[in-house]
Image (cartoon, grey):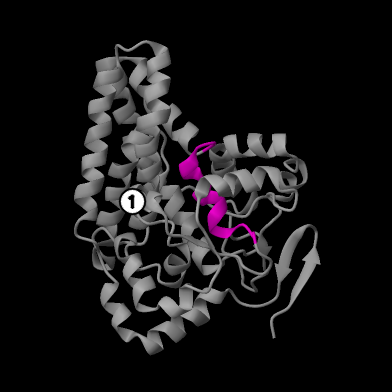
Amino acid sequence: MDKTGERGDFEWVYNDQPHTSRRKEILAKYPEIKSLMGPDPQLKWVVTGMVLTQLLACYMVHDLPWKWVFFWSYGFGGCINHSLTLAIHDISHNVAFGNKLAHLNRWFAIWANLPIGLPYSASFKKYHIDHHRYLGGDGLDVDIPTDAEGWFFCTPLRKVLWLFLQPLFYALRPLVVNPKPVSRLEMMNAAVQFAVNFVIFYLWGLKPIVYLIAGSILCMGLHPISGHFIAEHYMFLKGHETYSYYGSLNRITFNVGYHMEHHDFPSIPGSKLPQVKKMAAEYYDSLPQHTSWTRVLWDFVFDDSIGPYTRIKREYKLVKQE
């Protein structure tokens, strides 16, 4: 029997995440879904095109006035960079080259990372595994805001500030909630990133660097695409911790909106998640879903019942590795 209980201001539950049981049930009924698992042969070409587009943009903005650098950073480059973070999300599940070539996925993620301007891909991979395995896990899932965030960012103005600062919290929260040793891959990620940044700076000056990094920060903060951060797991309806969005923005975000489907089948590439929904429609059509990421942001800011505390948490009994 499912139970819910209050502890602090999060919604504490004492049952397993729903994705495990639903995955087993769907696979038993539709075993053909297994055919969707595996690498997406188009992903590497799409991502490479996006990286090259941003490198070309670096040249094109290097002699623009600063106001236009920021304009194009927010309106164009940041959208590509945010999309690249979601490509890295897909790549972290080994869907670029498959599980047998996992090391190529790690290096390809570093390639996809280059326009973002700051090293990100290796650290993301390290923590994203826990997000799936221990969804909502206290001290394990760093996607969950801290108590301090929930306590302070509780008014509309403060929630707007929190949305704006989301990239900062996503970067620093793991160091507080679940610190892990820095890996060799993370050091390589940083070395490659800063080396490329230096080359760009040497060739074209400071403006392309600002264009890339500002775009990443701005478009992962207060931006319509960033509505997916809130839409995915914030409890807009009591007892429901994962939501999908099936709108047009999926076309530029590697179908991250198909989030229930993704957590049910994380080894299926984003490009094939619509097929999962189509094959097993009766499992998804009746579940709560979002129709607009912009509306999600609006409701998050102005609905007093929604905020950083509006997340489901659970405890997992395990021995944490030192």
Quadrant assignment, res 197: top left
Range of magenta residues:
221-236
- Circle 1 packing at 10 Å, graded few (<14), some (14-19), many (20+), is few
Q: Which quarter of the rendered picture does the N terminus lie within?
A: bottom right
* Closer to the camera in the image, 198 or 293: 293
At 69% from the left and 43% from the top, the residue drawn is: 302
Q: Is residue 179 above or below residue 196?
A: below
Percent of width and height locating residue 49 = 21, 41
At 45% from the left and 48% from the top, the residue drawn is: 123
At 48% from the left and 67% from the top, the residue drawn is: 260
Percent of width and height locating residue 133 = 51, 68
Percent of width and height locating residue 166 = 57, 40
Instruction: State left or right for residue 47 relative to residue 130.
Output: left
Q: Is residue 25 visible?
A: yes
Query: How many numbered marks, from 0 up?
Result: 1
Percent of width and height locating residue 244 = 48, 62
Q: Which residue corresponds to mark 1?
A: 251
Q: Is 42 part of what is drawn in magenta?
A: no
* Closer to the camera in the image, 21 or 271: 271
Query: Quick one: SS at disc 1?
Result: helix
